[in-house]
């Protein structure tokens, strides 16, 4: 089945010829890959991978495995989604063991559902392997819990752009502003002015805490702490580049005590109880 020794302690699923596994590679750090994903890497004949998949993850694949880049980055030449889906079908119909490796989780703003739908329509068997989404794992690496019992009982994940590349017209920003205590926005850097403006117009306070986490979980991770009113200017001044996650809400304040990476570097927490002094 594979040129590599089997993983220990378990009956691991076999990636069979003609199958496609749609697999999440996590937010960046190779150590956040799941064991099922590693198992797939050690069996696949072909790996079709995205731009945000760390090169070290591909090193775990079989030496003989074909590697096909299918990255999509905003503003840059990219493979068309329909072409990627059809390529997966062609590879599977040729009897290949195909691993489709996508950053984060394939079903969280990753077009995994579209690819899976095309494969199923073509009669190709699939397996879904979830991954750690950047909106959870990336914020955790910044010391920000997306839920905290003293802060929020709801969190909403939002995409910053739709199929046209514009801010999603279908989103009700007024409802989001009023109904969700914490907002986590994927791919929102380009349209940060529109997003901030819509939330402020809907009544979110200017002094609401905001964090922007760029290159999350990687050695190049950068974190900007700001407020909703200053967010746009501060992002421009920081010269952050995507990929980045924007978190809006009081849970951002927990970074003042939960910034575990700074702890590891010898820095002390800034505040042991930041919520007592928080606005709102």
Image (cartoon, grey):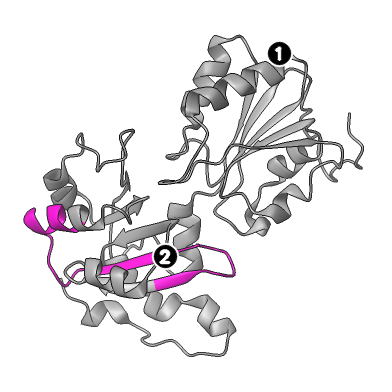
Taking 69 as reference, is 32 above or below it? below
Determine if the magenta segment contains residue 200.
Answer: yes
Where, quadrant-wise, is the N terminus in this rendering? top right
Q: Secondary structure at mark 2?
A: strand
Q: Secondary structure at mark 1?
A: helix
Q: In the picture, residue 37 is in which quadrant?
A: top right
- Disc on res. 172: none
Residue 144 percent across, percent down from the top left? 41, 67
Q: CA distance from mark 1 to mark 2?
A: 40 Å
Residue 214 percent across, percent down from the top left? 44, 64
Q: Nearer the viewer, residue 100 or 147?
A: 100
- Disc on res. 213: 2
Determine if the magenta segment contains residue 224.
Answer: no
Residue 19 percent across, percent down from the top left? 71, 21
Residue 237 percent across, percent down from the top left? 30, 75
Labels 1 and 2: the sequence-earlier one? 1
Residue ID at (36%, 65%): 212
Q: Which residue is mark 1?
A: 93
Taking 84 as reference, is 119 above or below it? above
Residue ID at (16%, 46%): 173
* The magenta segment: 196-223
Q: Nearer the viewer, residue 249 or 149?
A: 249
Q: Nearer the viewer, residue 266 or 199?
A: 199
């Amino acid at each position: 089945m594979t040129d590599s020794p089997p993983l220990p302690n378990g009956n691991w699923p076999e990636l069979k010829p003609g199958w496609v596994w749609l697999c999440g590679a996590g937010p960046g750090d190779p150590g956040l890959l799941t064991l099922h994903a590693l198992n797939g890497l050690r069996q696949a004949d072909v790996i079709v991978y995205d731009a945000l998949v760390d090169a070290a993850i591909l090193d775990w694949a079989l030496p003989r495995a074909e590697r096909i880049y299918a990255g999509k980055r905003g503003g840059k030449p990219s493979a068309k989604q329909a072409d990627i889906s059809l390529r997966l079908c062609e590879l599977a119909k040729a009897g290949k063991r195909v691993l489709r490796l996508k950053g984060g989780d394939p079903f969280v703003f990753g077009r995994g559902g579209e690819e899976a739908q095309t494969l199923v329509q073509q009669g190709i068997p699939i397996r879904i392997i979830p991954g750690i989404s950047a909106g959870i794992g990336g914020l955790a690496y910044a010391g920000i819990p997306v839920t905290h019992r003293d802060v929020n009982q709801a969190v909403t994940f939002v995409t910053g752009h739709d199929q046209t590349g514009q801010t999603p017209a279908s989103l009700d920003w007024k409802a989001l502003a009023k109904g969700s205590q914490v907002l986590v926005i994927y791919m929102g850097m380009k349209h940060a002015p529109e997003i901030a403006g819509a939330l402020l117009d809907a009544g979110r306070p200017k002094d609401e805490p905001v964090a922007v986490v760029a290159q999350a979980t990687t050695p190049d991770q950068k974190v900007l702490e700001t407020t909703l009113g200053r967010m746009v200017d501060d992002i421009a001044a920081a010269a952050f580049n995507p990929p980045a996650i924007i978190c809006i809400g009081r849970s951002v304040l927990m970074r003042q005590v939960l910034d575990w990476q700074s702890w590891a570097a010898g820095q002390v927490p800034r505040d042991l109880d930041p919520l007592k002094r928080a606005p709102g």
